[in-house]
């Protein structure tokens, strides 16, 4: 499910997993709508929830920062030139107060981290001299600090992807108190060094913290790209989720636009008129995904070409299925096959399924072939093909996908009995096959698809999200998926582990 933008709040990127490489990022989102296969809209309430995780990323930026040694000199009255160095600067006892943010329409996201308390420890090496004295010394020091942090990233399209300029980063120091060798009382050396050492440490802290936040953002962008590619990839089937335009930010939501092009064996699908419009989405839920039929149909074609739409049922499982009450009488050849002890039914897609979504559901047309084998012989007892048209609706609950169908048309043709003298089926036998496809075959295939798609979603980590009240809403030519959610803590942990490597 594609969707993302750049923080803050930084963890929003983790959930959405989407900004990928884009060779042609249009400056005007309106002109990009026709090339957009998938859209993600994350509303303000979702950003509020995700902002709660921001402090963890900020803490990682502070704690992971490595401060370079600083050297300088200062001319002091009565003492002369003082040469000094600051080394081994480290951060301790970090705590963060509260985090606030706002969505700034047409600009980006503003963020304030208030009351960041920390102790910076290090070593001062200094030397001073005059005609009276010449000494060099080294003294450990610590600096108590209380800081407010602000970041105002600017979103733009650059270097083939959506990027963020985080140079607008600032720190306000409410307290910066120097202690030498643990001495809490002023002394002549502290008075001598306090002003210019604290000034120097301020510059060092600001430079490294803002640099580390920018580094974390870059690591996060790579992490998201990898996560998105993994989520939307399975075997040789991939989906290009490159952005078609820079995200749009309003006071109520962030919206991103993605190509959604299926890539199968290095062959890409094409979208030229997907028909997206912002009015298709509301602001009542936390998260929205808009998916065009032009995304799903090439994906179904790839699944068909990859040989995934096939199912073999044999033995007792097959016999159990046909205990279903049917109005048509079971032909003798079919009954004998089930009683043979080694029956096997093989079904597969003869051509790629096609779907057309409307407000009443998703109309799916499919052509399938089937073979019934009995007793393990090479030649099948029964051959047939069928055309099926049905309306399918989907839902997601208890971390499982559910598919519901309403069959509108089933045609059975090219049905043969190769091992019999009269290979053609009569009307009664054809009706049995048709009814079996409707009442046994289609429900079985849908149940297998439910399990398989749920397995793929679980493999990609969807089950680790807390998803509340998800709805799948079919519309004319597209589908809207809307939901509320709880932030998946595992993604934050994975990102922080990678950041701190």
Image (cartoon, rainbow, N blue to C red):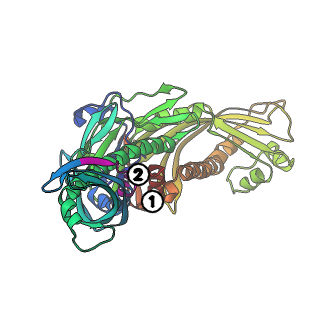
Residue shown at the point (51%, 42%) measured from the top left:
230
Q: Secondary structure at mark 2?
A: helix
Regarding residue 115, the answer to whether it shows in the image is: no
Specify the segment rendered in magenta: 61-72
Which residue occupies the extreme top position in the image?
267
Q: Position of residue 12 (x, y in %)?
A: 35, 53
Q: Secondary structure at mark 1?
A: loop
Residue 162 appears left or right of 177: right
Q: Quadrant of residue 91?
A: bottom left
Task: Using a 10 Å C-alpha cutoff, classify the residue at mark 1 as few (fewer than 14 neighbours), some (14 to 19) or many (20 or more).
Answer: some
Question: Residue 68 colored magenta?
Answer: yes
In depth, the one of 338 and 228 nearer the eye is 228
Residue 14, disc: 2
Residue 337 appears left or right of 222: right
In depth, the one of 180 and 427 nearer the eye is 180
| Up/down of 62 relative to 24, above or below | below
Residue shown at the point (28%, 59%) measured from the top left:
284
Q: Position of residue 285 (x, y in %)?
A: 32, 59
| Up/down of 383 relative to 131, above or below | above
Give the Cα distance between marks 1 and 2: 9 Å
Q: Quadrant of residue 235?
A: top right
Q: Position of residue 225 (x, y in %)?
A: 43, 41
Residue shown at the point (32%, 59%) measured from the top left:
46
Q: Position of residue 323 (x, y in %)?
A: 74, 56
State yes or no: discs 1 and 2 in contact (Cβ < 8 Å): yes
Task: Check disc 1 and report the residue beneath it.
Answer: 488
First in sequence: mark 1 vs mark 2: 2
């Amino acid at each position: 499910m594609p969707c993302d933008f750049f923080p803050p709040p930084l963890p929003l990127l983790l959930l959405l997993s989407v900004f990928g490489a884009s060779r042609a990022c249009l400056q005007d989102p309106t002109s990009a709508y026709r090339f957009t296969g998938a859209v993600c809209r994350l509303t303000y309430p979702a950003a509020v929830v995700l902002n709660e995780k921001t402090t963890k990323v900020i803490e990682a930026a502070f704690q992971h920062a490595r401060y370079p040694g600083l050297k300088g000199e200062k001319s002091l009255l009565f003492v002369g030139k003082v040469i000094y160095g600051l080394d081994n600067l480290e951060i301790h006892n970090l705590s963060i107060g509260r985090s606030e943010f706002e969505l700034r329409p047409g600009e980006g996201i503003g963020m304030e981290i208030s009351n960041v308390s920390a102790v910076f420890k290090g070593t001062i090496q200094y030397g001073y001299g005059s005609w009276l004295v010449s000494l060099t010394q080294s003294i450990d020091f610590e600096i108590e600090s209380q800081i407010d942090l602000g970041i105002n990233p600017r979103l733009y399209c650059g270097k083939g992807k959506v990027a963020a300029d985080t140079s607008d980063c600032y720190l306000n120091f409410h307290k910066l108190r120097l202690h030498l060798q643990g001495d809490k009382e002023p002394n002549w050396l502290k008075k001598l060094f306090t002003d210019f050492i604290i000034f120097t440490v301020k510059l060092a802290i600001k430079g490294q913290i803002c640099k580390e936040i920018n580094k974390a953002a870059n690591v996060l962008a790579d992490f998201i790209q990898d996560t998105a590619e993994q989520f939307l990839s399975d075997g040789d089937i991939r989906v290009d989720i490159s952005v078609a335009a820079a995200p749009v930010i309003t006071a109520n939501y962030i919206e991103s636009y993605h190509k959604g092009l299926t890539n199968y064996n290095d062959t890409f699908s094409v979208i030229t008129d997907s028909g997206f419009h912002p009015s298709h989405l509301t602001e009542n839920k936390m998260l929205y995904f808009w998916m065009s039929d032009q995304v799903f149909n090439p994906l179904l074609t790839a699944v068909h070409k990859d040989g995934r739409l096939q199912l073999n049922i044999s033995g007792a499982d097959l016999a159990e299925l046909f205990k279903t009450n049917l109005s048509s009488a079971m032909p003798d050849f079919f009954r004998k096959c089930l009683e043979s002890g080694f029956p096997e039914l093989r079904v597969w897609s003869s051509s790629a399924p096609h779907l057309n979504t409307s407000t009443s559901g998703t109309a799916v047309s499919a052509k399938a072939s089937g073979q019934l084998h009995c007793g393990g012989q090479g030649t099948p007892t029964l051959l047939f093909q069928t055309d099926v048209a049905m309306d399918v609706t989907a839902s997601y609950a208890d971390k499982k996908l559910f598919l519901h169908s309403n069959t509108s048309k089933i045609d059975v043709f090219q049905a043969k009995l190769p091992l019999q003298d009269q290979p053609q089926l009569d009307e009664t036998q054809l009706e049995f096959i048709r009814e079996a496809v409707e009442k046994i075959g289609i429900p079985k295939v849908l149940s297998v698809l439910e399990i398989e798609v749920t397995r793929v979603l679980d493999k990609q980590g969807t089950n680790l999200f807390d998803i509340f009240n998800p709805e799948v809403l079919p519309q004319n030519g597209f589908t809207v998926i809307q939901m509320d959610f709880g932030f998946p803590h595992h993604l934050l942990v994975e990102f922080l582990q990678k950041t701190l490597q």
